[in-house]
Image: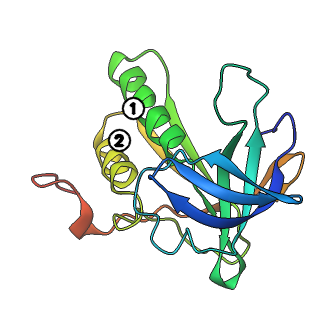
């Protein structure tokens, strides 16, 4: 995945109204769009480093979209899960139509992660959608470790995707 232009870094000052955040960028605090409407428990602490994608669209009210946040321990968490949820739904439709082999790849941007699993407490819609997609015929979900840089993200290692049995939709059998 390449960001054009490259992501820029800022410091989170506060998140408000679920869709907005105040981010210190350079010498000023700017309002940026937050695409994640979930609680973002542990991912919206003031002072955290954040990655911002600047979009040169004059019709947008806010120039930046918040893409990632560095949480305690240096873990980088993707904020823009709406994009992933949308892709999961599109892949399910393709698989059900039999038009293509549908594969979702989650990019993990921290070297210490050993497995990927849904976290309802942080992003319940994405977690629910992931479970439904895993139950769909022909949809595969993989996780790959990625090394983020200002000019892009580069994949290097496969990581297991684990969905504990208790998390499957009611009535679904493994």
Residues at circles 2 and 1 in contact by the CB criterion of under 8 Å: yes
Q: Is residue 144 above or below residue 56?
A: below
The N terminus - image quarter: top right
* Residue at 65% in and 47% down: 32
The answer to whether residue 146 is visible is no
Q: Is residue 87 above or below residue 135?
A: above
Q: Is residue 152 above or below residue 115?
A: above
Quarter of the figure with residue 90: top left
The C terminus - image quarter: bottom left
Q: CA distance from mark 2 to mark 1?
A: 8 Å
Which residue position is annotated with label 1? 89
Describe residue 1's horizontal placement relative to residue 89 as left or right: right
Describe residue 140's horizontal placement relative to residue 134 as left or right: right
The residue most toward the left is: 171
Which residue position is annotated with label 2? 133
| Image coordinates for residue 167, horizontal then vertical, percent | 25, 64
* Residue at 19% in and 53% down: 169
* Residue at 47% in and 64% down: 40
Q: Is residue 89 above or below residue 33?
A: above
The answer to whether residue 43 is visible is yes
């Amino acid at each position: 995945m390449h960001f054009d232009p490259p992501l820029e870094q800022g410091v989170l000052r506060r998140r408000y109204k679920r869709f907005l955040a105040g981010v210190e960028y350079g010498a000023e605090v700017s309002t940026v769009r937050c695409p994640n409407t979930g609680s973002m428990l542990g991912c919206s602490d003031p002072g955290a480093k954040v990655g911002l994608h600047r979009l040169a669209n004059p019709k947008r009210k806010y120039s930046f979209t918040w893409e990632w946040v560095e949480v305690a321990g240096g873990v980088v968490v993707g904020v823009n899960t709406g994009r992933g949820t949308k892709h999961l739904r599109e892949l399910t439709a393709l698989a059900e139509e039999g038009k293509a082999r549908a594969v979702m790849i989650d990019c993990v941007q921290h070297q210490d992660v050993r497995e990927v699993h849904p976290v309802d407490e942080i992003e319940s819609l994405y977690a629910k959608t992931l479970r439904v997609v895993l139950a769909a015929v022909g949809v595969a979900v993989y996780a790959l470790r990625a090394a983020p840089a200002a000019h892009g993200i580069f994949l290097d290692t496969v990581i297991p995707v684990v969905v504990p049995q208790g998390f499957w939709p009611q009535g679904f059998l493994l």
